[in-house]
Amino acid sequence: MLCENNHKFDGWFPNIAEFERQQKKDLLICPLCETKKVDRAIMSPSIGKKTDKKKKTNDYSDQITSDTMIPAAQAKNILRKIRKHIVTEFDNVGNNFFKEYRKFEKGERNDKFYGTPGQDEVKKLLEEGTNLFHVPEIKEDA
């Protein structure tokens, strides 16, 4: 995805209609500058050879979506800052995340909350096209 300030970031949608629905409702937000003017970035189609799904690999290069790199220590510092910001500025709704997200969808609450939804709840939200962000906990000695 690409925001009006040329920040590129990833988003997953089950189909283009879901992307457009979320875009129309201003639910798409750039994680870097928080603008809601977000559109799809140009991407190449996924046309390729059939792969063996049973094959296990430790090559994570297919998960890298950009050639831009920073040292891992800096990334860890940034992730720690993100987590600290979330913990201090957002409401911890614990295992009520799913219920609170439904309230947010109805306009009954703001989106400044975090919590620990169950795996079935996460699956349901993702199937609906909801963008979620896993807030990593980075160990101090990592």
Image (tube, rainbow, N blue to C red):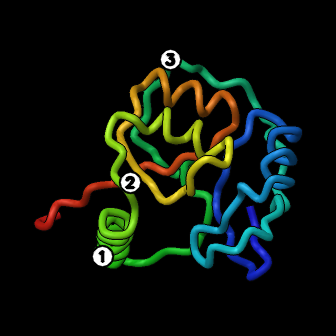
Residue type marked 2: Val
Determine if residue 72 is in view: no
* Mark 3 Cα-neighbour bin, 10 Å: few <14, some 14–19, many ≥20: few
Q: Residue furthest top?
A: 54
Q: Does residue 125 lie above or below 133 as drawn?
A: above
Q: Which residue is mark 2?
A: 135
Q: Which of the 4 image quarters holds residue 34?
A: bottom right
Name the element at disc 1: helix
Q: Badges 2 and 1: C-beta atoms under 8 Å apart?
A: no
Q: Does residue 137 lie above or below 46 as drawn?
A: below
Q: Which residue is mark 1?
A: 77
Q: N-terminal of the two: label 2 or label 1? A: 1
Q: Which of the 4 image quarters holds residue 45?
A: top right
Q: Does residue 30 lie above or below 130 as drawn?
A: below
- Calculate the distance from the C-alpha at mark 1 to the C-alpha at mark 3: 36 Å
> For this view, does 92 lie left or right of residue 20?
left
What residue is drawn where x is 59% and y is 20%? 52
**Location of residue 131 in the rendering, given as x and y in whole percent from the top left corner:** 62, 46
What residue is drawn where x is 56% and y is 20%? 53
Which sits in the foreground, 48 or 139?
139
Name the element at disc 2: loop
Rendered-image quadrant of the C terminus:
bottom left
